[in-house]
Amino acid sequence: MTPLSPAFRALSVTTVTIGILATAVVLPGAAVADTIDPAADIFPAVGTSDFDVEHYDVQMDYRANDDISVVTTITASAAATLDTIRLDFEGLTVDTVTVDGVAATFAREDDKGATLHKLVVTPAAPVSGDFTVAVEYHGAPGTHEDPDGSFEGWMPTSGGVVALGQPVGTMTWLPSNNIPSDKATYDIEVTAPTQTDARDLSVASSGDLVGQEPVGADRTRWSWHVGTPLSTSMLVLAVGHYDIQNSTITLASGRVLPEWSFVTADASDEDKALVASMRGRIASMLDWLETKLGPYPGESTGLIYDYAGVGYALETQDRPFFDGGIDEATLLHELTHMWLGNSVSPRTWSEIWLSEGGASFFESYYAWEVREQGDPRDLAAEAIGPGGDPDIWEVPTVGWTDPAQLFGNQSYVRGSYVYSALMNAVGPDGFDRIMRAWTKEHATSSVVTEDFLALANEVSGRDLSRTLVQWISSDTPPAVPEDIVSFEPLTAETTVGTAPVLPTEVTPNYASGPGTPASVTWDIADADWSTPGTVTLTGSGTDFFGAPFTTASLVVTVSAPASPSPTQSATPSPSSAALPHTLSATGAEPATVPLIAALSLLVGGAVVLVAARRRRKAD
């Protein structure tokens, strides 16, 4: 999800000069934890572990927004014998229920304050193993209000309706096991009027459009199939007056994806042009995301653009929903969710930072690599800097319990800091390796934070837990790094009279492993390049957390120059200059330094000063 508030949608990035992230942190007066316990479920009354749904078959007759009749057949499996089957279902009138084809009794339970809306089915005989439940129902679906005052569910639009599920709104129209950890496949068949208000009516959903056929003189049956297991929260259903764009997209990987995009016919010409521009970027965004996260996990692509008044965009599977606004960052955010959130899902909503923090971070990552804007590693640096928001540390990314905080800063902004800290710890290439392994190992499954820590450690070959746990759980900025134990040895070589080219970075070693390189300034005030031997330089700089170091070391070997060959002139034109007292090497390019060589040669009883000057391009 991308709330339209700028506080969530656009993580501003200001380029700053930052070195590295220490691979572990300690907080003043606080013990350092290595693990994160799974978070408590903030919606304990929603969903069940009694059974696992494998497939939903939905046969809907849509006459108007407030007039539908549906038969939904659920194929599921129970590990133990069940006397009752508890489905999440809010509103609508249930007509009949059968279990394995036999009539069953049913009752309703509703407690809005507890987010409890249940259809309790009692089969004629207990079930175990595989079973089916068919629910026939009708009426006017409603919206669902979350504890934070936001809405989802059956949402009226300019010309119809869109059904949005995150976090629990799908139960307003679909009896289900409505939790992110239970993923299933879907067949959704909607028979709707061919036209309303003298305009064509269309039906959009997730997955592939496998059928569109007339039914009688004035109705059309739309059939959608979702073959990749998906949680109910990421399923979409939209009915409205849409301009449909159908095409194919060939990715750089060679995969060909069908595209179905649905843009409300009520959109202005300006909005339609904007949406068309954004559609044109889907292919390149998916190409880029595949290099970072592995193969695209969906079956098709596209978008749905309409006016529902919900105030957010949503990562509905295959074609995200945009509510009257779209831009590049938001599109990238929602497409990232195809991997982070839809394929790899939080086990409970309390772990949502894994998806929302990831998608927010990838907005900055994309801007850096594709637009050359900012650096995503700076997000964490700014968070602990003087301009950071101290309030961000009040709520941890994992461990909060108030469902009204679900879409708060700790999920989006602070969650992005964790990903930024990880990239600082392992570098962009190491980050990409971890993320590709993450989406591959946990595809179509549900995860907790500890799974992320374990995989990051495994792929990096380092113990990153202590560092990342502080970013996840600390109630103060993780501002004090672990002490630097040593630096990776550095050497350089030069010849007598020639100032060496010095490295611009050093790699600190911490107790828990090596960090990533930090910019360094070498003190060469007393360096003497005039005689053979070795010169040891001391370097200083600042690591990722702003902690200074002054003990970096560099050994420079000064060798005598090779003797000139008989054909070479031994008397070049003399010149002279003074060496600078210090050399700054903090930039990507070394600064211009006049390099002088003085060599005394005895020629014909006279001493001739030979000097050579080398220049390097200035920054």
Image (cartoon, rainbow, N blue to C red):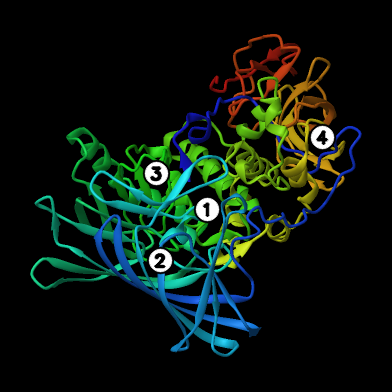
Query: Closer to the N terminus: mark 3 or mark 2?
Result: 2
- Does 64 sit above or below residue 306? below
Give the position of the C terminus as an image quadrant. top right
Mark 3 and mark 1 in contact (Cβ < 8 Å)? no
Crowding at label 3, few (<14), some or many (≥20) Cα neighbours within 10 Å? Answer: many
Query: Closer to the N terminus: mark 4 or mark 1?
Result: 1
- The residue closer to the viewer here, 104 or 342, is 104
Could you say where residue 212 lies in the image, as x and y percent from the top left?
19, 69
The circle on residue 167 is: 1
Q: Dot 4: what SS?
A: loop
Q: Dot 2: what SS?
A: strand
Which amino acid type corresponds to the residue marked 4 in the rendered image? Pro
Which amino acid type corresponds to the residue marked 2 in the rendered image? Thr
Residue to which mark 4 is pinned: 481
Can the viewer see residue 188?
yes
Mark 4 and mark 3 in contact (Cβ < 8 Å)? no
Q: Dot 3: what SS?
A: helix
Could you say where residue 576 lies in the image, as x and y percent from the top left?
66, 9
Between circles 2 and 1, the one closer to the viewer is 2
516 relative position to 531: left or right: left
Q: CA distance from mark 2 to mark 1?
A: 23 Å
Crowding at label 4, few (<14), some or many (≥20) Cα neighbours within 10 Å? Answer: many
The circle on residue 331 is: 3
Between circles 4 and 1, the one closer to the viewer is 1
Residue to which mark 2 is pinned: 93
